[in-house]
Image: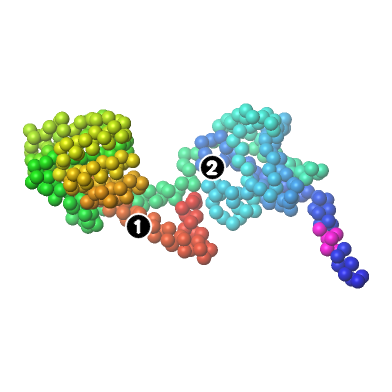
Amino acid sequence: MLRLTLCLTVLILAPLFSLYAQENQSLTPIEDFTAFDTPNDMGSGISLTWRVSPNDREGVTYIIYASTMPDGPWKEQAQILSTLGFKSDAPQYFGVNESNKQWHFYELSKLKENKDDNNAKPIPNGTTTYFKLAVTDGVNTVESPGVSAKPYGNWFDTSKTNVLIFVIIFSCLIIFFISLARRNPNLFIRHIPGLDAIEETIGRATEMGKPILYLNGLLDMSSLSTIASTSILAKVARKVANYDSQIKVPCYDPIVMSVCQEVVKEAYIEAGRPDAFKEDNIFYITSDQFAYAAAVDGMIVRHKPAANFYMGYYFAEALLIAETGAATGAMQIAGTDAITQLPFFITTCDYTLMGEELYAASAYLSREPLQLGSLKGQDYSKAFIILMILIGSILNTIGFALIVNLFKTF
């Protein structure tokens, strides 16, 4: 019974003695407190670092003071719990070395007149500022010697070195394939059935003596999908001119209308038939979504075009227009990067270009070396990134974060 009582007493009192020992543990001097210009910034940040010490425990706080003069007056800038704020929390500055966990870190970009100052001013670029660090447990306080630093702007953000290297690699790939495409315009590109069917679609409309309808989507010329759509329009219009058929392009945006008029006109000139170009066939309807859809549906029902092309970005009107075209028996080819509208085009159109197939269409149809080489170079770059992701996932799973860190920072 006596032994049991002693054991229980020890178990109860041990945590209390441990807590008492921690509360009465003396504070040690702060080691290696330094201040320096924050790397990779525009010139207003100062980084403060100091070594992890036995002071780091619950109830202990670091206090940062700053001054514009070597001897003060010192003004409190921040309070940091001793268990927080490490170099490892800022890999963009210090990388991913394990030694970063042995150093505290705090970044200061503004100077306060007092700890409650809400209108702190940025540290002037090129001006020397002085700092002092104190550690306190609420009873005892230990201060470090003062240090100084001067912020200045950096020309190059070294944390983006990995981005620069990848840009150089991918650019070299693209330049290589452009050079290769100039020597061999027949570089392999995966067949896209929707693009292969363009000539058949236009030929069918010509045989039936009916017009071809071409839509550019509902975004303006700043959209990549609209730019890709007008590139495809140029190729389609040239074939239409060669077959002596008619193409109608109702537009949602007046700027897109002007661009399309020039694109189609140029296509007719290249085909040697400038006299067959009719500017009135490329026209502006309205910039209201469903009014535009209603007008296009009306055209489809009245003129019954034999071929409909829907290229660009679409919203809820996609199904309304495509279903009307399908009901009139038109052969339809769609292409969009709007993921939410792809199912509607797939179910109502004969062929659908999905996602990046829309962007690849211009190179696919023209075989122009600059576009073809860019497309091949981008494809190989994507394959490289996918391979790195797979390898990185495997290595990270077994505890090697080398490739993961490569995509974070150096």
Q: Quadrant of residue 39?
A: top right
Using the rendered image of the protein, determine whether residue 182 is visible from the camera's viewpoint: no
Name the residue rendered at 64%, 37% in the picture: 148
Name the residue rendered at 49%, 50% in the picture: 409
Quadrant where the N terminus sits is: bottom right
The percent coordinates of residue 273 (x first, y second) are 8, 37
Q: Main secondary structure of the magenta part?
A: helix
Residue 82 shown left or right of residue 151 in the figure: right
Using the rendered image of the protein, determine whether residue 81 is visible from the camera's viewpoint: yes
Residue density around tag 1, few if under 14, some if 14–19, many if 20 or more, within 10 Å: few
Residue density around tag 2, few if under 14, some if 14–19, many if 20 or more, within 10 Å: many
Q: Under tag 2, what secondary structure?
A: loop
Q: Under tag 1, what secondary structure?
A: helix
Name the residue rendered at 25%, 39% in the picture: 216
Q: Quadrant of residue 149?
A: top right
User: Please, which residue is most extreme toward the right here?
Assistant: 2
Callout 1 amino acid? Ala
- In three-dimensional space, the C-alpha distance between marks 1 and 2, rounded to whole angstroms, equals 33 Å
Name the residue beneath numbered marker 2. Answer: 39
Residue 193 shown left or right of residue 271 in the figure: right
Above or below: residue 98 compared with residue 313: below
Above or below: residue 312 compared with residue 116: below
The percent coordinates of residue 356 (x first, y second) are 30, 49
Magenta extent: 10-15
The percent coordinates of residue 44 (x first, y second) are 56, 34
Name the residue beneath numbered marker 1. Answer: 383
Residue 281 shown left or right of residue 128 in the figure: left
Which sits in the foreground, 175 or 375?
A: 375
Name the residue rendered at 57%, 40% in the picture: 37
